[in-house]
Amino acid sequence: MSDLAAEEGIPAVIEGEPLKGKHALIVVENLPLPFDRRVWQEARTLKAAGAHVSIICPTGKGHEKRFEQIEGVDIYRHPLPLEAKGALGFLLEYGAALFWETWLAWRIFFKRRFDTIQGCNPPDLIFLVALPFKLFGVKYIFDHHDINPELYEAKFDKRGFFWRLMVLFEKLTFGVANVSIATNESYKKIAVERGGMKPERVHVVRSGPDLSRLKRVEPVEAWKNGRAHMVGYVGVMGEQEGIDLLIDAVDHIVRKQGREDIQFVLVGGGPALDDLKQMTADKGLADFITFTGRAPDQELFEVLSTMDLGVNPDRVNAMNDKSTMNKIMEYMSLEKAMVQFDVTEGKFSAREASLYAAPNDAVDMAEKICELVDDPARRAAMGKYGRERVVKELNWQHQIDPLLAAYKQALDL
């Protein structure tokens, strides 16, 4: 596939409209639409294939309307409590979400009967919304975004009762699903071995970027805060994302190496954002690290276009090792080299577009960041490789056929 063809993105109409006359409901709990890029690309693809598409999701910053139609897709949003912290917080969040998802699903069903429900985890509880509709012949498609037992262990560094509960919910989710969508081969293996799914009913649909929308803009020097170089991070600010290790790496660069020529700009929101800001301030690094919070697309594209390289500090653990992170695809799409720890799926995606630091070693990450900052020719070559890999193998156009195959199989088309 050429750059030009890849940048055409999702077609307005997919030839033959294989899902014409069908109504697909998508339920996603952790992000509003269209902010969730993967789910929005799935929705637009289903719409192009002829389906009527409805989405249930939470409200969020910039997405406060309770109902909105965008590009022909019906979006129903509901409120949620503040982002959960601790067992009680998660119980409140999940309970509220299930109430709203169930109420809205029935409201949509009586307005216009749907043929499928696509549940996008986390959490692995959306099957409870879908279960009664199966009595009416509705098919359940599980879109497996996160492996929740591993996510729980990564967040709380233990197993115990709640971990076993996560394993049970995951098993029940796969048991209810007619078809499962996996984001990579590691997730497909879990669906088959732990979830009991038949391999032929698990479809790998990677989180490939839509290159018609993810484009470079003019660099904005103000993001560099007067410094010669800039390193960017895009993603969630959670406890398992390893941002604390990145802060330790910045501390090594500034304090031990004595370098004051690199600005770090971190884009994203999440439950650990305030704690990470405080950690940065306590280390005296606030002038070297900019936290934007959850940012609109324009700011995101400015940061991605301005930075010299990207960084993915996800800890090496069972969760991150098996997960494909969107930030890696975004760096590669904009022809940016990166530094990350040596995680299986991150390495599969990036290959030669990344340097790989020793597992969870902030000092080695710092050394590799400086190595790339000081070698623009190597950065350019790595960035070019990453862009070509996205264009030829990983962008969203390559995911359209497997997504539609999952739907056609669920609907016996």
Image: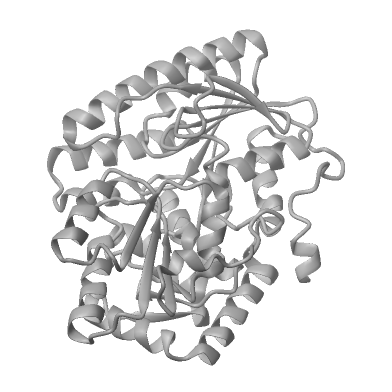
Q: Residue 330, located in which quarter of the rendered image?
A: bottom right
Placement of the N terminus among the 4 image quadrants: bottom right
Question: Residue 382: x, y in percent?
Answer: 54, 83
The mark tally for this picture is 0
Residue at x-position 27% and y-position 55%: 240
Q: Nearer the viewer, residue 173 or 282?
A: 282
User: Which residue is outermost to the top?
Assistant: 110
Q: Nearer the viewer, residue 195 or 229?
A: 229
Lateral position of residue 151 relative to residue 349, left or right = left
The figure's colour scheme reads: one colour
Question: Residue 166: x, y in percent?
Answer: 27, 39
Q: Residue 315, located in which quarter of the rendered image?
A: bottom left
> Would residue 152 be visible to someone looking at this image?
no
Q: Nearer the viewer, residue 302 or 169?
A: 302
Lateral position of residue 128 relative to residue 46, left or right = left
Question: Residue 319: x, y in percent?
Answer: 32, 57
Residue at x-position 53% and y-position 17%: 105
Residue at x-position 80% and y-position 30%: 20
Lateral position of residue 132 relative to residue 404, left or right = left
Lateral position of residue 404 relative to residue 83, left or right = right
Q: In the rendered view, would you say 53 is above or below 389?
A: above
Q: Residue 94, located in which quarter of the rendered image?
A: top left
